[in-house]
Amino acid sequence: MQIYQRTKELQMKKLEGKVAIITGSSRGIGKEIAIKLSHEGAKVIVNYSSSPEKAEEVVKQIKQQGGEATAIQADMSRVDQIQQLVTKAVEKYGQLDILVSNAGIEYFGKLEEITPEDFDRVFSLNVAGQLFVTQAAARYLTSGGRIVLTSSISAGKSVLYHTLYAASKAAVSAMVLNLAPELGERGITINAIAPGGTATDMAQENAKRYTHPSLQNVSPDALLKSKISLQRLAQPQEIAAAVTFLVSDDASYITGSTLAVDGGILF
Ligand code: NAP
């Protein structure tokens, strides 16, 4: 009987019966989170802003692997569209158990170059977007609900011309810390992940800017070795694995935390 019970436990997927929204999941880290949560049995909403084909590809891949997914367009920097996304998700699957707020944009610029429009663009997605999607999702989440926001290892590091992005990501860690007691009263956990350099379009576009101008002649490989204990970038699947842990029952006593998934940063 015990062996039967154990075998059944091992066969059960960790997120069977759950419904999850993953913002910005047409590409990069979000895509892998959507795929991984679906492997664990969750029905997933694949949100995107401007890549319908890529989002539909993710849905197709999930369905081919026996999962259930729906793509929904919504700009996460627009509060009206955030609310529509959450409403549509609940209409589609009848409930909401997990929110992974992953959509974000990178920004590099000198102090004198930063405009109010730049500030609004970065903060309306990276900060306000994450706050208001949390607010919208929290209306539907019940005890056992899970929220994971996306910070960055950049929040706690000095990088030349990275002020705006780093400040936006630091705000996310402060948000989860302070929302934890409010949501904790309802049995909901909220945490953030702080990825280090991860092999996605975003990293590809910005990798060079992380390097101080005086080190531009040093090979990218040597730089990675000097800055990261594991001597390589993360794969998006490795960030997705940490998120899957945080939204599972295994993380039932973790809230208000920012989990670094950075390969052991050295600088
Ligand atoms: P990415 O490759 O640039 O992909 C971004 C995703 O977000 C895409 O699916 C994109 O959708 C979506 N998105 C962008 N703007 C959006 C908006 N206004 N509304 C809804 N969706 C939007 O980025 P990534 O590297 O996977 O990064 C994902 C998250 O991790 C971000 O929050 C980023 O700051 C954080 N992060 C990344 C790294 C890294 O090294 N990659 C490190 C630390 C933290 P479309 O395809 O429709 O444009």
Image: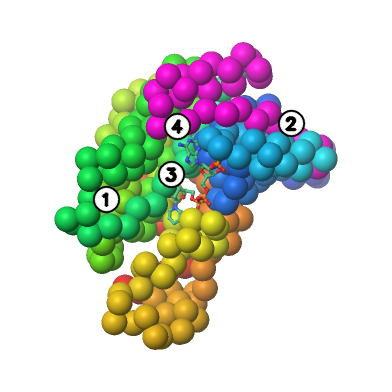
Which mark sits nearer the N-terminus, 1 or 4? 4
Please report the residue visible at 30 percent of the width from the left and 77 percent of the height from the top.
213
Please report the residue visible at 46 percent of the width from the left and 19 percent of the height from the top.
83
In the rendered image, residue 1 lying in the magenta stretch gets the answer no
Which residue is denoted by mark 4 in the rendering? Answer: 76
Amino acid type indicated by mark 3: Gly
Amino acid type indicated by mark 4: Met
Amino acid type indicated by mark 1: Leu
Asked whether mark 1 lies closer than 8 Å to ligand 1, one says no
Which residue is denoted by mark 2 in the rendering? Answer: 68
Which mark sits nearer the N-terminus, 3 or 2? 2
Which residue is denoted by mark 3 in the rendering? Answer: 104
Q: Are marks 3 and 4 in contact (CB under 8 Å)?
A: no
CA gap between label 1 and label 3 equals 13 Å
Asked whether mark 4 lies closer than 8 Å to ligand 1, one says yes
Amino acid type indicated by mark 2: Glu
- For the C terminus, give its image quadrant: bottom left
Asked whether mark 3 lies closer than 8 Å to ligand 1, one says yes
In depth, the one of 48 and 102 nearer the eye is 48
Of discs 2 and 1, which sits in the foreground?
Answer: 1
Q: Magenta residues, as a range?
A: 65-94
Asked whether mark 2 lies closer than 8 Å to ligand 1, one says no
Which residue is denoted by mark 1 in the rendering? Answer: 164
Reply above or below: 48 against 241. above
User: In what element is the residue under mark 2?
Assistant: loop
Residue 245 horizontal side relative to residue 216, left or right: right
Please report the residue visible at 26 percent of the width from the left and 66 percent of the height from the top.
160
CA gap between label 3 and label 2 equals 25 Å
**Badge 4 local density, few (<14 within 10 Å), some, or many (20+)?**
many
